[in-house]
Every structure is written in structure tokens, then in C-alpha cells.
Image (cartoon, grey):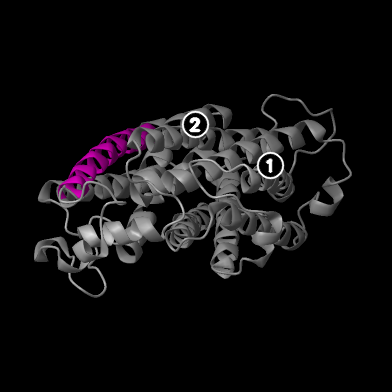
């Protein structure tokens, strides 16, 4: 199997993982805003997410002189470590599923900020002690503090932006009572002129609500924040579980049984994530949540609108997670949590693709810039804390 030997190689894996893990949520959000049911999107996503793990396992897990390789470990008596890997896959799947609904309520950027920061504060601390403190604490924990500051800024950004949107929509009591005449003849500063609505205007928000799959007008943002924090707790546990699977810190394996390599662990991790996602999303087809319309497995199979994007999201997430684990096995999983600075990437896509924060107040912009700055500092500090696993 192929092993990452150098600190530079580990950091390269982390940076590439940061790009991939920050991009796939934007793609999922794009399909939801175009009206595709999240159940359909997630079923497509989970197929290619598993496929990415299989590709990594049968290629990188088989090449190179290091032993034991992926195929060999499938028949070894290592079920204890397999259970840890599968537990990690289950909590990651729950977190990813929850964020798909949270994005609609509180936006891509804020969702990623809160979940990533929760992950770092809890997950990084657990990984630091599980890794026998191979990361430099005097560097690592100031980086964690930066994430804490970033989540405070993220919450403030959400509150300020929500107030901005409320102000834009003051002239419209509800979406249902907004007529086409109002949209065509509304005041110039609301963006309600004929033609395509300008991003950030009241008309843009109204058109988005009519088109998207998950309707959020009139619903409390507390729902979205609760879902977001639940996802953050799930995300904070998957990396420590994977760490236990590959390094056996609790000595659960029998004497002489090799530890799971990162590729075998990732394969089992992805299997459990796939099975849980399949069960939950097929259930959500027939018994949907959050007011979504009913669907069916046949309707899912016939829904090709945005399927290619959903497949791409699954590949990006799968390869991103794999790269994160490869970097973590080499330099410490606490340092690898630097990839949780993915809001840097997600916010970029949120602004570019979805017009988030367009025509917002100066206060919102100041808070947004402060939040992004803290993430830049945090990712630099966490990567600087990288150690070397002996």
C-alpha cells in the first residue's frame, strides 16, 4: 500500500481535501435551489461517495511495498477496528444528511462555519489525546481558539444577514400573497422590475423560494440552527472514531493482528455511511420531512435533472475524506482537522453561485470578512502544528 511519509506530503493532502470538502456542499445546494428533492440528490451522492472509497482502496491500498495491503486485511481478524471505522461512517452520514437540510434554512456559509467549528473544538481535542500528543499543543490549541472566534463571527453574520433579508421583504407579507403584478411593478430598489431578478434583492429571494425544493419562508431559523448543531456534533466524532480504527489506541485487537491501514478503514467507513444513507433516504422518499413532497424509488430513478452534479458531489466528498485521513495518519488527525476550514471554500461558492450576502449591510460585510480572516489564521496554525507518526 502507498504511505505518506513526509510532512509536506501530508499538508498537500490536507489542502486538496480542503478544496474538495469545501466544494461538494455547494454542488448539493445548487441542485436543491434548482428544485431537485434532497432525497434524490443524496441517494446519487452516496453511490459515488462509496465508489470513491473503493477506487482509493483498490489502487493506493494495493500498490507499494508496505504491508498488509487492502485485500489482505479483508480476511484478517480485525473486527474491533472495523467497528470503530463503521461507527465513524455512521456519524458522518448522519451529519452530511443533516447539513443538506440545514443549508436551506441558514445558508451554505453559516452552516459550514458552525459545523466546522464544532468539529474542530471537540474532534481536534479528542484526536490530540488519541494521537499521544504528537501535535504541538502550543500551536494546535491557539488554532482551535481561532475556530471558536470564527463560529462567533459566523453566528453574528447569520443574524445580521437575516435582518437584512427581513428588511428587503418588508413590503411583502408572505410568499403566497405576493402576486406577479407586485413582482413586475415593485419599487426599483427591491429588484422587482421585469426580467431576471438581481441577486440579493427581494425579488431574487422570492423567486428562489418558489423554485427551491425546501420551502423556508415563515419557518423559524431555530430549526435550521438546531439541525446545524446536531450535524456539528456528528462531524466532531467521525475523525476520532477513524483514528481509533487505524491506530488501536485502546488495544482491542488480538496480539499479532496488524492495525487497519487507512485504506481498509476508509472502505469500511464508507460502507456503513452508504448503508445508513440508503435506508434513511429511501424512507424519506415515502415519508418526507420539513414539508417536502412525497416521492418514490421509481420517481428517483427517472429523475435525471441534476444527477450528474449529485454524482460529482459524491466523488468530491469521498476523495476529500480519503485525503484527509491519509494526511491525518501521517501528521496526526488533530492537524488534519485543518480541512474543517472548508467554509473558506464554501463561502466563496456561496457568494459566486448563490448570491449570498449580495446587497447586505456594511455590518454584515465587516462580520463576514472577520470570519473568513479567522479561518485563514486557523488553517495556517493547525497545519503548522503537524507532527510525525512513528
Q: Residue at x 54, y 45 (%)?
A: 96
Q: Which residue is mark 1?
A: 276
The mark closer to the camera, 2 or 1, is: 1
Q: Is residue 188 above or below residue 275?
A: below
Location of the C terminus by quadrant is: top right
Would residue 161 be counted in the magenta stretch?
yes
The answer to whether 124 appears left or right of 174 in the picture is right
Q: How many marks?
A: 2
Image quadrant containing the N terminus? bottom right
Q: Quadrant of residue 81?
A: top right
The x and y percentages for residue 256 are: 85, 33
User: Which residues, given as a range, are shown in magenta?
Assistant: 139-167
Residue 142, image quadrant: top left
The residue lying toward the viewer, choosing from 182 and 294, is 182
**Residue annotated with mark 2:** 233
Residue 118 percent across, percent down from the top left? 42, 34
Looking at this view, is 273 or 30 the one in front?
30
Q: Residue at x 31, y 65 (%)?
A: 352
Tell me if residue 300 comes above or below residue 82 in the rendering: below
Q: Main secondary structure of the magenta part?
A: helix
Residue nearer the viewer, 122 or 253: 122
Secondary structure of the residue carrying numbered label 1:
helix
Asked whether residue 195 is drawn in magenta, I would say no
Amino acid at each position: 500500500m502507498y504511505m505518506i511519509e513526509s510532512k509536506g506530503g501530508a499538508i498537500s493532502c490536507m489542502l486538496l481535501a480542503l478544496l474538495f470538502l469545501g466544494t461538494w456542499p455547494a454542488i448539493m445546494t445548487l441542485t436543491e435551489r434548482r428544485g431537485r428533492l434532497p432525497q434524490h440528490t443524496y441517494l446519487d451522492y452516496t453511490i459515488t461517495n462509496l465508489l470513491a472509497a473503493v477506487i482509493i482502496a483498490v489502487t493506493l491500498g494495493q500498490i507499494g511495498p508496505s504491508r498488509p495491503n487492502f485485500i489482505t486485511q479483508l480476511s484478517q481478524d480485525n473486527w474491533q477496528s472495523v467497528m470503530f471505522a463503521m461507527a465513524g461512517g455512521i456519524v458522518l452520514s448522519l451529519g452530511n444528511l443533516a447539513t443538506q437540510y440545514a443549508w436551506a434554512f441558514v445558508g451554505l456559509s453559516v452552516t459550514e462555519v458552525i459545523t466546522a467549528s464544532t468539529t474542530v473544538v471537540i474532534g481536534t481535542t479528542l484526536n490530540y489525546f488519541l494521537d499521544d500528543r504528537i501535535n504541538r499543543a502550543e500551536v494546535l490549541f491557539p488554532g482551535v481558539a481561532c475556530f471558536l472566534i470564527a463560529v462567533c463571527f459566523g453566528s453574528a453574520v447569520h443574524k445580521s444577514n437575516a435582518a437584512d433579508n427581513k428588511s428587503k421583504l418588508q413590503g411583502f407579507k408572505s410568499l403566497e400573497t405576493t402576486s406577479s403584478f407586485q413582482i413586475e411593478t415593485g419599487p426599483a430598489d427591491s429588484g422587482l422590475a421585469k426580467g431576471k431578478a438581481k441577486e440579493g434583492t427581494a425579488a431574487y429571494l422570492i423567486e428562489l423560494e418558489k423554485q427551491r425544493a425546501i420551502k423556508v419562508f415563515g419557518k423559524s431559523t431555530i430549526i435550521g440552527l438546531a439541525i446545524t448543531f446536531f450535524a456539528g456534533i456528528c462531524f466532531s466524532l467521525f475523525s476520532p472514531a477513524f483514528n481509533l480504527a487505524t491506530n488501536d489506541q485502546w488495544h482491542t485487537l488480538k496480539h499479532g493482528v496488524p492495525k487497519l491501514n487507512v485504506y481498509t478503514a476508509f472502505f469500511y467507513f464508507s460502507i456503513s455511511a452508504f448503508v445508513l444513507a440508503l435506508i434513511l433516504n429511501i424512507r424519506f422518499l415515502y415519508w418526507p420531512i420539513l414539508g417536502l413532497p412525497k416521492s418514490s424509488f421509481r420517481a428517483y430513478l427517472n429523475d435525471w435533472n441534476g444527477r450528474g452534479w449529485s454524482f460529482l458531489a459524491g466523488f468530491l466528498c469521498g476523495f476529500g475524506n480519503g485525503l484527509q485521513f491519509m494526511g491525518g495518519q501521517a501528521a496526526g488527525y488533530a492537524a488534519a482537522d485543518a480541512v474543517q476550514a472548508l467554509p473558506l471554500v464554501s463561502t466563496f461558492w456561496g457568494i459566486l453561485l448563490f448570491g449570498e450576502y449580495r446587497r447586505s449591510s456594511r455590518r454584515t460585510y465587516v462580520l463576514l470578512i472577520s470570519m473568513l480572516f479567522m479561518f485563514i489564521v486557523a488553517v495556517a496554525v493547525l497545519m503548522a502544528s503537524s507532527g510525525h507518526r512513528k
